[in-house]
């Protein structure tokens, strides 16, 4: 089962409200319809703009079937690792529950404690072995200028933490806005490692906050990557 499984996630790291392009909540909903989970780390400020950013971040995660955490810059790294781990577990638990309901007419919660513990052991093993395809969407709008060094380190730490898993890993990074009139730009195509040099060179703060286009771009990357996966190793999609 683990060799056939793929979990697809988008992680959005942003400090403010989307103000360019389509609605990011609808973009997250579109992604989730394709089995992609959208997580959001919000680094929002105070006042009306902060409150709006807070609600938008939670709405994006709700629509994307993921988690949202509002954090201080120093907590981004640990939060990114925790969210990726927890949403993988949640996704696998949902799949296991669906299988149990289909076979036994029971969910995990309906099982005796000993059987429930065995199911959780299976989930933990699957979490380590399934393939993870992850796109990190980084807000590089002008207001992120002071936070970009911390974000860069958080992405690197996240990739390093995921490499200890035995399952295949593919990470891509996009920044929003892009250069010139572009809403987004591809910082790194899918790879098993994060290109730290690319993060150093490409993460430059400028312009507004096109969060919706970034989520759409990330979903397109994941779906294109899925189509390019070796046909000799079909994978079961979890979402």
Image (tube, helix red, strand yellow):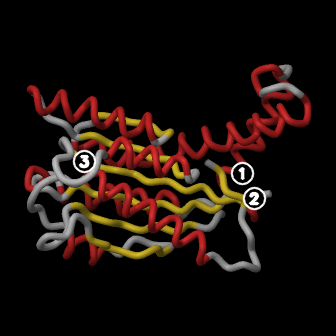
Position of the N terminus, as image quadrant, is: bottom right
Figure check: 32 above or below 56: below
Q: Identify the residue at horizontal 71%, vertical 65% (top origin).
A: 235
Q: Are marks 2 and 1 in contact (CB under 8 Å)?
A: yes
Q: Earlier in the sequence, mark 2 or mark 1?
A: 2
The tag on residue 198 is none
Quarter of the image where one finds residue 121: top right
The tag on residue 126 is 1
Figure check: 40 above or below 195: above
- Structural distance between the alpha carbons of marks 2 and 3: 32 Å
Q: Are marks 3 and 1 in contact (CB under 8 Å)?
A: no
- Structural distance between the alpha carbons of marks 3 and 1: 30 Å
Viewer-side label of 2, 3: 3
Figure check: 147 above or below 186: above
- Structural distance between the alpha carbons of marks 2 and 1: 6 Å
The tag on residue 2 is 2
Dot 2 surroundings within 10 Å: few (below 14), some, or many (20 or more)? Answer: some
Q: Identify the residue at horizontal 86%, vertical 20% (top origin).
A: 112
Q: Identify the residue at horizontal 31%, vertical 73% (top origin).
A: 186
Dot 3 surroundings within 10 Å: few (below 14), some, or many (20 or more)? Answer: many
- Give coordinates of residue 208: x percent, y percent: 12, 54
Viewer-side label of 3, 1: 3
- Secondary structure beneath disc 3? strand
- Give coordinates of residue 155: x percent, y percent: 35, 59
- Secondary structure beneath disc 2? helix
Figure check: 126 above or below 98: below
- Give coordinates of residue 126: x percent, y percent: 71, 51
The tag on residue 14 is 3
Left or right, 108 with reference to 154? right
- Give coordinates of residue 109: x percent, y percent: 75, 22
Left or right, 237 with reference to 147? right
């Amino acid at each position: 089962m683990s060799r056939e499984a793929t979990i697809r996630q988008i992680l959005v790291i942003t400090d403010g409200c989307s103000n360019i392009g389509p609605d990011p909540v609808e973009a997250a909903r579109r992604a989730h319809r394709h089995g992609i989970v959208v997580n959001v780390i919000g680094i929002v400020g105070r006042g009306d703009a902060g409150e709006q950013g807070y609600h938008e971040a939670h709405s994006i995660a709700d629509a994307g079937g993921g988690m949202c955490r509002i954090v201080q810059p120093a907590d981004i790294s640990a939060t990114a690792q925790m969210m990726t781990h927890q949403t993988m577990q949640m996704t696998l638990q949902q799949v296991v529950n669906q299988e149990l309901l289909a076979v036994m007419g029971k969910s995990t919660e309906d099982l005796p404690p000993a059987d429930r513990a065995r199911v959780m052991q299976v989930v933990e093993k699957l979490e380590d072995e399934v393939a993870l395809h992850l796109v990190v969407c980084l807000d590089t709008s002008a207001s992120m200028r002071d936070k970009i060094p911390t974000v860069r380190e958080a992405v690197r730490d996240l990739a390093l933490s995921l490499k200890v898993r035995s399952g295949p890993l593919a990470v891509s990074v996009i920044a929003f806005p892009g250069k010139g009139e572009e809403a987004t730009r591809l910082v790194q195509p899918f790879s098993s490692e994060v290109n730290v040099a690319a993060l150093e060179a490409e993460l430059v703060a400028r312009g507004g906050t096109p969060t919706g286009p970034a989520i759409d771009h990330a979903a397109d990357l994941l779906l294109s990557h899925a189509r390019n996966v070796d046909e000799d190793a079909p994978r079961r999609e979890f979402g």
